[in-house]
Amino acid sequence: MSSPTPRTVLITGGAGGIGQGIARAFIAAGDHVVLADRDADAVTSAASELGATPLPLDITDAAAVASAFSSLSEPSGVDVLVNNAGILSVHGAVTELTPEAYRSILDVNVVGTFTVTQAFARHRIAAGGGGAIVNISSIGGRQPTPGMGAYESSKAAVDSVTRWSAIELAAHGIRVNAVAPGPVLTPMLEMGMPEGSPAREAWSSRIPLGDLAKISDIAPAVVFLAGASHITGVSLAVDGGQLLT
């Protein structure tokens, strides 16, 4: 469904599979998409293919984030922020993981999300308020998996940042929500867990609807929350019912 008035949507982590899938959904709705990613070559290529605007950006660099929003202030600014950027680079048991490794994932997934959220909020308040943020969280923030505690605790923090931002920014008409997927069949994950493989079957057996989510299952939830004018502070699970088990 098309937006009544085209919006400018900034999607971080835009060069990845989920970021591109979200971008396609907003573009199909008639919106203008700005794809941000720290990989300049990848985001430029993805934006060219999709018909979006590329924005090389490291979300852990607060000065660069502030500068990006300043550059996007004209002609109409950014209406919707999708905090999709995140890393799943650290695995380890609680007795083995080093503080340095743990800190590396928190810096991107939590501090990075906060940094872009803060810059967007200042941007929208300066423009008179309004706008929406959709964070990409994970059901891992609520359902632990051994060895994935660093990532999962970072996503629990993203849910907390979502609620914190929602209650404080409501007075400015800025809504903040999150989409919390279960495992998603990105191209990389499909390569590592092809259909019929034991690993894929093990994950699927935990999901009442029978399989992992496709990227096309995640994007509609993001577009919905971006436009749901009376919903804020929600973390919507898109997990095939995995949290029910």
Image: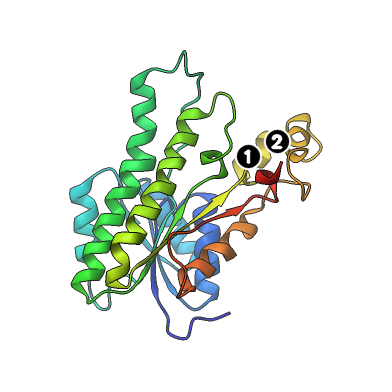
Circles 2 and 1 in contact, beta carbons < 8 Å: yes
Q: Residue placed at 33% from the left, 57% from the top?
A: 165
Q: Is residue 134 above or below residue 79?
A: above
The disc labelled 2 sits on which kind of residue?
Met
Looking at the image, can residue 127 be seen?
yes
Instruction: Give coordinates of residue 105: x percent, y percent.
Output: 39, 33
- Please identify the quarter of the rendering in which residue 129 is found: bottom left
Q: Residue placed at 57% from the left, 32% from the top?
A: 144
Mark sitting on residue 193? 2
For the residue pair 32 and 111, the one nearer the viewer reads as 111
For the residue pair 6 and 169, the one nearer the viewer reads as 169
Residue most extreme to the bottom:
4
84 relative position to 24: left or right = left
Question: Would you name the residue on which mark 1 appears?
Answer: 189
230 relative position to 25: left or right = left
Q: Is residue 192 above or below residue 180?
A: above
